Image (cartoon, helix red, strand yellow):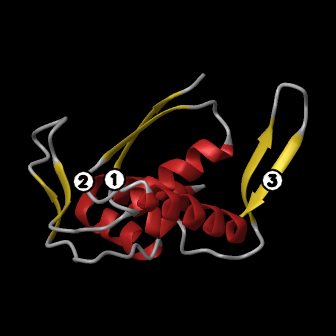
Amino acid sequence: MNEYFEAYYWSIENLPEFWAAVWEFCKVKSSQPYEKVMDDLSKFPGAKWFVGARCNFAKNLLRRKDEKTAFVLRNELGVRRTITYKELYHLVIRVGLTLRRFGIKRGDRVCAYMPNIPETSIAMLAATVLGATWSSCST
């Protein structure tokens, strides 16, 4: 337990080093690296994190393409459904291609009125991969 508290105190006393280590540990992929981990922490909210970095979180989430479980859904009727990372990747690609056929491109906005089901997350990831902004509310 002592190691936990040492790590905890190190993380809050050495914020830039801690978050740089998290970035490396998570193997975040970016098209442009960060110049600085953080800037102006006196502004909260308003502090800037990983200044200069450009990354697409959907592309980072979709790096895995294995058979491990990505989503588990259990609805109100008790029906259980799972989606693997491999299935998720292929579903996001299919939805993304459909969005592209509809003319969705970087900078566009995609809004949806959908229930809290995996397909909503799939649509969000597809829009994000294309560089579109996603917004939704659940039914």
Q: Is residue 67 above or below residue 44?
A: below
- Which residue is at 58% across, 31% downward? 114
The residue mark sitting in front, 2 or 3, is 2
Q: Callout 2: few (<14), some (14-19), or many (20+) C-alpha neighbours within 10 Å?
A: few
Give the labeled residue for mark 3. Answer: 82
Q: Amino acid at mark 2?
A: Gly
- Which residue is at 67% across, 46% downward? 118
* Label 1–label 2 contact, CB within 8 A: yes
SS for dot 1: loop
* Label 1–label 3 contact, CB within 8 A: no
Q: Amino acid at mark 1?
A: Ala
Give the labeled residue for mark 2. Answer: 107
Q: Amino acid at mark 3?
A: Thr
In primary-sequence order, the first of circles 1 and 3 is 3
Q: Is residue 79 above or below residue 32?
A: above
Q: CA distance from mark 1 to mark 2?
A: 5 Å
Q: Callout 1: few (<14), some (14-19), or many (20+) C-alpha neighbours within 10 Å?
A: some
Instruction: Report x, y in % for residue 99.
Output: 46, 55
Q: CA distance from mark 2 to mark 3?
A: 32 Å
Q: CA distance from mark 1 to mark 3?
A: 27 Å
Instruction: Report x, y in % for residue 101.
Output: 45, 60
In primary-sequence order, the first of circles 2 and 3 is 3
Q: Quadrant of the C terminus?
A: top right
Quadrant position of residue 15: bottom left
Quadrant position of residue 29: bottom left
Instruction: Report x, y in % for residue 119.
Output: 64, 46
- Tell me, for residue 132, which label it has, or none: 1
Q: Quadrant of the N terminus?
A: bottom right
SS for dot 3: strand
Q: Nearer the viewer, residue 13 or 93?
A: 93
- In this picture, residue 69 sits left or right of residue 114: right
SS for dot 2: loop
